[in-house]
Amino acid sequence: MIDIFELERYCNGLLDAGGFEDYCPNGLQLDAGRREIRRLVTGVTASQAVIAAAEQAGADLLLVHHGYFWRGEPAPLTGVKGRRVRHLIRAGIGLMAYHLPLDAHPELGNNRTLGDLLGIRQGRALAQGLVWQGEVEDELPAALARRMTRLLGRAPLLIAAGDRPIRRIGWCTGAAQGAIVEAAAAGLDAFVSGEISESTTHLARELGIHYFAAGHHATERFGVQALGQHLAEKFALDHLFIDDDNPV
């Protein structure tokens, strides 16, 4: 058991939440009035389905990667966002979210955990912890795509730059398709992100770099689980990860 504000302070320090200029507030986004946290539920996004499942599981706190109050979105708590917030308050479930700080963390972050899952060796940050690079052993693009399908549970979209094998690979989870330019400039053979844009195909072909769009949700399931498990072990919490599947 831990006080919710003590838990927030710990997470803010662990993830260096104040060191990022982000698109949303990091930390506690909703205090539903419950101070003592015993049961922690984690998820990728604070969707209605995840909130309902968290209530069913008896959660005191919902910890996610994608929370609320994004830059540029309407501020009023109406419509979908209003319903979600009302549900959390009625259920007495607090909401905590970490976006870029959870992508970048060197041990628990989305990039680290995805790289470990894919068996990438010598994984390290290429720049500011948001784009990572590492090595695989002369893996052909089609073979890596098959391995991603098995490990992530969905087939990536592959834009192959010929048949040359992959040795040096870069990756950044989520909507990081624009970082393909940075990956190519670093001399990498391939780049993996979650999403793809129309322009990404042309960039991959013209830069001569293999590109894998492996799914925004699929690539960002692992950091929040690692963080939840870390908190559960440190503070003797019950922890449950809820996966609200998303094909994007």
Image: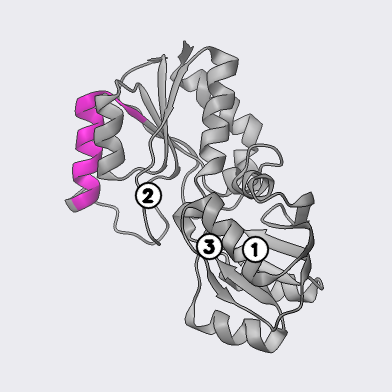
Residues at marks 3 and 2, CA–CA distance in whole angstroms: 26 Å
Which three-letter amino acid code belongs to the residue tagged 2?
Answer: Phe
User: As displayed, is residue 164 above or below residue 144?
Assistant: below
Q: Mark 2: few, some, or many residues within 10 Å (few <14, many ≥20)?
A: some
136 or 104, which is in the foreground?
Answer: 136
Mark nearer the N terminus (1 vs 3): 1
Residues at marks 1 and 3, CA–CA distance in whole angstroms: 11 Å
Q: In terms of secondary structure, where does tag 1 sit?
A: helix
User: As displayed, is residue 171 above or below residue 234?
Assistant: below
Residue at left offset 60%, top offset 16%: 234
Label drawn at residue 69: 2
Label drawn at residue 247: none
**Would you name the residue on which mark 3 appears?**
214
119 or 109, which is in the foreground?
Answer: 119
155 or 122, which is in the foreground?
Answer: 155
Mark nearer the N terminus (3 vs 2): 2
Residue at left offset 78%, top offset 56%: 134
Which three-letter amino acid code belongs to the residue tagged 3?
Answer: Ala
Nearest-to-viewer mark from 3 and 2: 3
In this image, 13 relative to 43: left or right?
A: right
Q: Quadrant for the C terminus, please.
A: bottom left
**Would you name the residue on which mark 1 appears?**
144
Residues at marks 1 and 2, CA–CA distance in whole angstroms: 37 Å
Q: Is residue 173 visible?
A: no
- Mark 1 and 2 residues: CB-CB less than 8 Å, in contact? no
Per the rendered image, the range of residues in magenta is 80-94
Residue 54, horizontal then vertical, whole percent: 31, 30
62 or 76, which is in the foreground?
Answer: 62
How did the renderer colour the structure?
A: one colour
Q: In terms of secondary structure, where does tag 3 sit?
A: loop
